[in-house]
Image (spheres, rainbow, N blue to C red):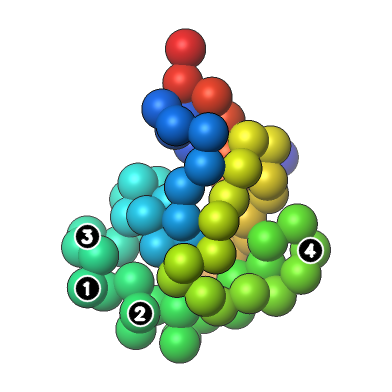
Amino acid sequence: MAEPIEIQTEEITLGQFIKLANIVESGGMVKMFLQDFNVYVNGEQDQRRGRKLYLNDEVEIEDVGTFIVAQED
């Protein structure tokens, strides 16, 4: 089951999402993280930090887990 990560906006970049999900500690680490791990957005591999994610998008990161973009209450 995917872990929901709540955002306050309508969209978020993949890099911001990875940081928000506490997968890396800083934005500077995101670039190296994306080079080392396969990331899939809605089943499609994507390593772009600037990839826009929207509500209900699913992000799967090999060896880390599966997350879903959720709306903050």
User: Which kind of residue does numbered mark 3 sit on?
Assistant: Glu
Element on which disc 2 rests: helix
Tag 4 residue: 43
Name the one closer to the observer, 16 or 63: 16
Tag 1 residue: 28
Tag 3 residue: 25
Residue 33, position as x, y percentages in the image: 39, 77
At label 1, counting other C-alpha atoms closer than 10 Å, the crowd grade (few under 14, some 14-19, many 20 or more) is: few
Name the one closer to the observer, 1 or 31: 31
Residue 31, position as x, y percentages in the image: 35, 79
Q: Earlier in the sequence, mark 4 or mark 2?
A: 2
- Between the C-alphas of marks 3 and 4, the distance is 25 Å
Q: Earlier in the sequence, mark 3 or mark 4?
A: 3
User: Which kind of residue does numbered mark 2 sit on?
Assistant: Lys
Element on which disc 3 rests: loop
Tag 2 residue: 31
Element on which disc 4 rests: loop
Residue under the image location 54 percent in, 24 percent down: 71
- Would you place residue 5 above or below residue 8 in this image? below
* Residue 33 seen by the camera: yes
Name the one closer to the observer, 3 or 47: 47
User: Which kind of residue does numbered mark 1 sit on?
Assistant: Gly
At label 2, counting other C-alpha atoms closer than 10 Å, the crowd grade (few under 14, some 14-19, many 20 or more) is: few
Task: State yes or no: discs 1 and 2 in contact (Cβ < 8 Å).
Answer: yes
- Would you place residue 22 above or below residue 34 in this image? above
Q: Say whether residue 4 is left or right of residue 21.
A: right
- Between the C-alphas of marks 2 and 3, the distance is 12 Å
At label 3, counting other C-alpha atoms closer than 10 Å, the crowd grade (few under 14, some 14-19, many 20 or more) is: few
* Quadrant of res 2: top right
- Would you place residue 24 above or below residue 70 in this image? below
- Between the C-alphas of marks 3 and 1, the distance is 9 Å
- Between the C-alphas of marks 1 and 2, the distance is 6 Å
